[in-house]
Image (cartoon, rainbow, N blue to C red):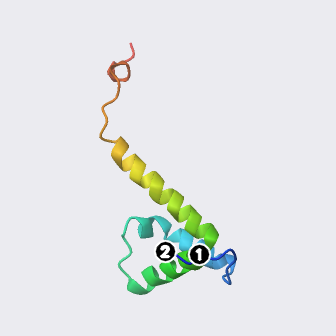
């Protein structure tokens, strides 16, 4: 995902469509090659959506690793 331009020729509906498929794209769940290519093309040309995708990708990576840690003992005790 390179060559992101400052402005894009897409209308807002392209951004909304990209957002509809955002998480499926980030999680590699889009099986339709045409839809995948369309979203990828949009992200290559829309700085706003590209930035959002990168932020979400970083958050996903960090939360995946966080689930492996054990909660502190004070949080494990039931409240009476």
Numbered disc 2: secondary structure: loop
Contact, CB < 8 Å: mark 1 with mark 2? Answer: yes
* Location of residue 80 with respect to 32 vertically, above or below: above
Q: Nearer the viewer, residue 11 or 77?
A: 11
Q: Position of residue 4 (x, y in %)?
A: 59, 75
Estimate the x, y position of residue 43 in percent, counting from the top left.
Answer: 54, 75
Q: Is residue 51 left or right of residue 33?
A: right
Q: Residue at x 43, y 80 (%)?
A: 36
Q: Identify the disc placed on residue 4.
A: 1
Give the answer, above or below, for where 79 lies relative to 39. Answer: above
Q: CA distance from mark 1 to mark 2?
A: 8 Å
Instruction: Kindly identify which numbered label has been placed on residue 1.
Output: 2
- Seen as rendered, the residue at the extreme front is 3
Question: In screen coordinates, is 23 left or right of 12?
Answer: left
Q: Position of residue 39 (x, y in %)?
A: 50, 78
**Could you say which is closer to the camera, residue 3 or residue 38?**
3
- Secondary structure of the residue carrying tag 1 is loop
Q: Is residue 54 above or below residue 1?
A: above
Q: Is residue 2 above or below residue 26?
A: below
């Amino acid at each position: 995902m390179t060559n992101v331009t400052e402005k894009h020729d897409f209308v807002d509906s392209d951004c909304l469509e990209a957002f509809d498929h955002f998480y499926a794209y980030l999680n590699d769940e889009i099986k339709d090659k045409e839809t995948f290519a369309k979203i990828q093309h949009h992200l290559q040309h829309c700085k706003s959506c590209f930035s959002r995708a990168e932020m979400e990708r970083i958050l996903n990576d960090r939360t995946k690793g966080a689930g492996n840690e054990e909660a502190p003992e004070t949080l494990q005790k039931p409240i009476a």
